[in-house]
Amino acid sequence: MSEKFEFPAVTPLIASLPATVPFTGPEAIERKTGRLFRARLGANENGFGPAPSVLDALRNSLGEIWKYGDPENYDLIHALAKHYNLDPDQLTVGPGVDALLGLIVRQYIEPGDIVVNSLGGYPTFNYHVAGFGGKLVNVPYANDKCDLQALAKAAHEHKAKIVYLANPDNPLGTWHNKSDIEAFINSLPKSTLLILDEAYGELAPQGDLPPMSEIWPNVLRMRTFSKVYGLAGLRCGYAIGLPERIAMFDKVRDHFSINKMAQIAAFHALADQKYLDEVIGKINNAKQQIKEVANNHGLKTLPSATNFVAIDCGRDGKFANAVLDRLIQQGIFVRKPSVPVLDRLIRVSVGPKKELDLFAEAFASALIAADKG
Amino acid sequence: MSEKFEFPAVTPLIASLPATVPFTGPEAIERKTGRLFRARLGANENGFGPAPSVLDALRNSLGEIWKYGDPENYDLIHALAKHYNLDPDQLTVGPGVDALLGLIVRQYIEPGDIVVNSLGGYPTFNYHVAGFGGKLVNVPYANDKCDLQALAKAAHEHKAKIVYLANPDNPLGTWHNKSDIEAFINSLPKSTLLILDEAYGELAPQGDLPPMSEIWPNVLRMRTFSKVYGLAGLRCGYAIGLPERIAMFDKVRDHFSINKMAQIAAFHALADQKYLDEVIGKINNAKQQIKEVANNHGLKTLPSATNFVAIDCGRDGKFANAVLDRLIQQGIFVRKPSVPVLDRLIRVSVGPKKELDLFAEAFASALIAADKG
């Protein structure tokens, strides 16, 4: 640091943080390799895209983008409330779940407070925890699922302020059903907030997750338009909870942060549930295709209630890393966990058949190349 | 608060904050009155909209909105750097200046730290200061301009961590030239960060503001695509400063927060400087029209280097409030300052001639009605 930079100084907490990008974007890899990816299957996006009705609505609204969006997100919140049979004050909208996670950590965490997450769980959440001075306690997965008993035990032992659970899980795709989740919620300390991140919730088997009308006093439930609705590029997610808890967001949120295109797209996406059914069918077919590619090589996949499939490469992390490197080299963008035990997996997001065919071809040669070392 | 809500509890700082919407959106007024505004001239938007080339680029990119944007904002940052003859590491991009202001306050302010702003200055900045526990010292305007000497004096007296200056100013539209600004920067304590918010910078008389290549160690300079570029609905702004200071944003920013449409629109907007020249001409004509409307009633306007004009209603705040109410009742959305001395003004943003004609007509009858009390 230059002497000049000694003043004005950031806070000691900020000074202590590393500069980080929790996820390297595919664009950064493309810039580094100088080659565009042929298949974009690594960011758990929905390559089938949003409904044509949503694209029409956006096309018709382009003339409005000089206007700030409604800071109260009234239309979208009321549509969501109606859709889920909730009261509007049980919902808040944010510019993506990532941003909402940051706002929640800011609301509940002071430096030194304990937060529990699964070891290998969502890095962006961990980034926010570090960013507000929280201390992370990591609980290993058990049998490729979040270990609910161990998470609750850690919450009690460490008097955790927050426990984070992605259900369905990312990066594994596995999930717990509603009776497990309800028991888990009841098993937590009364002073612990559960962030129940259901970004992939629409892809769980119907009826497996707790009904959306269920509100618990110690839970904030998160959903998004980035995954099944195919709108990752627009940034729109929402949180559901007690009205008193939802009201806290109005103390800290950036009121104009939901861009107008996101407001319009989310509203129309929610209205087109017919398309949603169709796209869920496409996603399930794509998952089946990924599973078959793995099975054809004698490899297993984890059960998935998401828009991606974790393939067990059948050996150690080093081998799976080598497979990943060979896929990247062949222009196939996928990602994998780095934490031991999970690191034997590579995670393939759904996409159109053409891209999955490219993956299948590249995967075959990647396995051979990685095997040769 | 219900007993249930006693646990889990937000931090004492968050608990102490009021739930706030710094600006009531025109949509909320429309819902309340049950009538749509006929003219939208209150949010300092650019009713002339973005360049046709930008709309074309967006139309052609709609098929990409299922993709997350590049978390490094590489293309946009490099285009901005080239445009301003800066190094890319002297720039960061955020989802609007509002969000960047929040990130800066988070970086520099601990509870109890002092922040200096003009009395009646940007409410969203003050909201962020309160949100991180900062203590605000307000410095009155002098002769309808930010009082640079008094701001610097307050910074010294209170050992301020941050001083905020909008130049050109909002809500007044007035501005200081580059020698004033440079002297002001030099007059500040070395431990004070100046946030120099130039959201309206492109509308200042050419050469009046410091050149964009100028970087000071104690300044973060802010610009936006929301105003002259006509992209308020998409949320994209940027900050310029020392590389060491810009690097701090990578410790706390929400990496995927710039939506893909904003990245694309901003990139193309920057490339179309020919349209920018045209729209600046339209904005200046519209400002002239607003000035003439005021002058026709024997009223003065403040000089403006922004996309709005502050009309001095010539009497006290009560009278100007009555004028504003009558304008709102007639379906004309404008805003006004509420702090005494400034509260004699109403602030009219530019827009197409048709909307300004509606304003002119409504203003005449509003003045008469307000005069009758």
Image: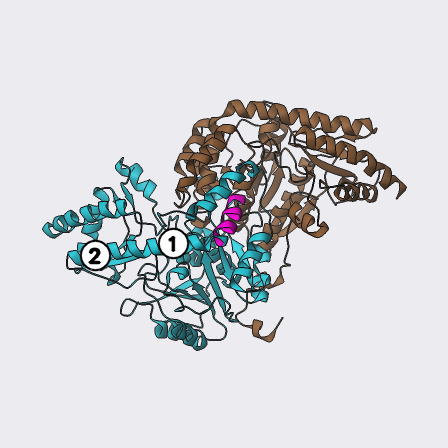
Chain colours: A cyan, B brown
In this orientation, which residue lies closer to the viewer: A13 or A205? A205
Query: Relative to A192, is B336 above or below?
Result: above
Query: Relative to B174, is A212 above or below?
Result: below
Distance between mark 1 and mark 2 Cα atoms? 21 Å
Residue A268 colored in magenta in the image: yes
Picture coordinates of residue B13 (x, y %)? 58, 61
Extreme residue in the right direction: B372
> Is B112 on the left-hand or right-hand side of B61?
right
- How packed is label 1: few (under 14 Cα within 10 Å), some, or many (20 or more)? few
Picture coordinates of residue B91 (x, y %)? 46, 36
In this orientation, which residue lies closer to the viewer: B351 or A171? B351
Q: Is residue B195 visible?
A: yes
* Mark 1 touches mark 2? (CB < 8 Å): no
- Residue at image position (19%, 49%) is A363
Q: Which residue is mark 2?
A: A292
In the rendered image, residues at marks 1 and 2 fall on the same chain:
yes
Q: Which residue is mark 1?
A: A278
Query: Relative to A341, is B280 above or below?
Result: above
> Is B164 on the left-hand or right-hand side of A302?
right
> Is A254 on the left-hand or right-hand side of B368?
left
Q: From which residue to which does the magenta span run?
A: A260-270
Picture coordinates of residue A294 (x, y %)? 20, 56
